[in-house]
Image: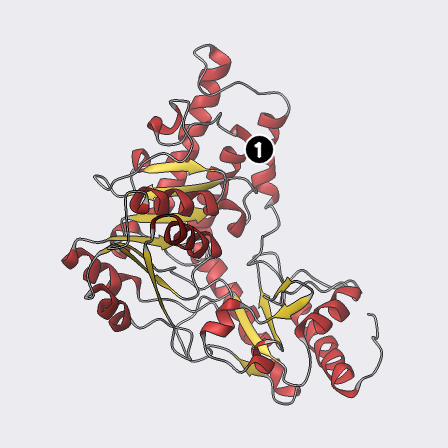
Amino acid sequence: MPGAYFDNNATTPLDPRVGEAMRPWLTDSWGNASSAHRWGQRAREAVEAARAAVAALLGAAGEDVVFTASGTEANNAVCATLLAGAGPSDRAVVSAFEHPSVLAACDAWAASRGVRVARVAPGPDGVVAAGSIRAALDAGGTRLVALMLVNNELGTLQPVTEVARACRERGVALLVDAVQAAGKIPVRVEELGADYVTIGAHKFHGPLGAAALWIRPGAPFAPLLIGGTQERRRRASTANVPALVGFGRAAELAAAELERRAVHLAALRDRFEAGLTAIPDAVVHGRDAPRVPHTSSVAFPGLLNADLMMRLDLGGWAVSTGAACSSGAVEPSPTLAALGLPRELALASLRVSFGAANTLDEVDRFLPVLAREVAGLRAGRPVAVG
């Protein structure tokens, strides 16, 4: 039997209903949403309907939502807005396992302007303590705090609302990357208390190439892309109408099905983690911390995760190592390194992430294959495809 796709934190398959909503804008309907004629105005109406749907998913007003091409672009734009005028006396406070679009952006401003970057490490449970960020804030000079709502590798929930209160008390802006949260758990911007919130369509069965940045009214924002009046002069570029229509439809479906999806995803993850008892010494990272229902990060000591991933891929099973290759040397994922895990354990870890289309039958078929391949690697046996 075929394998299954368990790498939904990387991207999710497009919901067929989303594809159907997009289809007319890829074939029979077209127009530049900035054009004044009827074709352009129909496109503009479709974009604004999508904006309203995305805003509704966040409990926000449409005029506060800026469409972008990716979460990376949105995060980069916020970092540039808040750090462009900074210098050596200024700081950015970020979690040590933020998305690279935040960490690399802050490092770039550190290199070019001397901005100091304080990276706050998570605890061994995969959660950054709010008190640790407050302590970093109290050192003064902070222009930006960035804390993701859900860690993309561990699935652990971060104390965003507590950090937001601390930021408000000190007049510091807070960026929350909610890309791995939106469409899976409730994400309401007013409850979060952040100044900027990023989400992406392709993480909840929408299309690639469509994301959004919510900006609190009155929060500063300087466009990263200039040269046009689109997005109320906050992001110049011709609107990607098909992708944005798909984004809106995916947001509508996520809002309507959020509770049912969460129950389904939790059942998949729980079945998977319960089945790991058949594999000696399996370790689930962050198991006792608050987590989203669709993500499991698990280590199998005594092997290399890249080898295990390749063996599984040969059998049609998609998972993620979280590791990056640099100069020919496999390194532990930055997230697991931030936890302070031993190198050997970090390099033995896989991320298994579930989506709405996955089934319990797929999980049940995957577990014995996983157990067999882990045992094979530990014993030095050749790969057994299937």
Q: Residues within 10 Å of mark 1 (few under 14, many from 20)?
A: many
Horizontal relation, residue 45 to residue 30: left or right: left
Q: Is residue 182 visible?
A: no
Horizontal relation, residue 360 to residue 212: left or right: right
| Residue at figure coordinates x 63%, y 62% from the top left | 326
Which amino acid type corresponds to the residue marked 1 in the rendered image? Answer: Met
| Residue at figure coordinates x 69%, y 81% from the top left | 303
Rendered-image quadrant of the N terminus: bottom right
Residue farthest top in this picture: 37
For the residue pair 92 and 182, the one nearer the viewer reads as 92
Q: Quadrant of residue 301?
A: bottom right
Q: Is residue 250 visible?
A: yes
| Residue at figure coordinates x 54%, y 40% from the top left | 209
Q: Against 35, is 196 above or below? A: below
For the residue pair 227 and 229, the one nearer the viewer reads as 227
Q: Against 366, is 183 above or below? A: above
SS at badge 1: helix
Residue position marked by numbered label 1 in the rendering: 22
Q: Percent from the top left, x then y, of residue 29? A: 58, 20
Horizontal relation, residue 377 to residue 21: left or right: right
Q: Percent from the top left, x then y, of residue 321? A: 62, 67
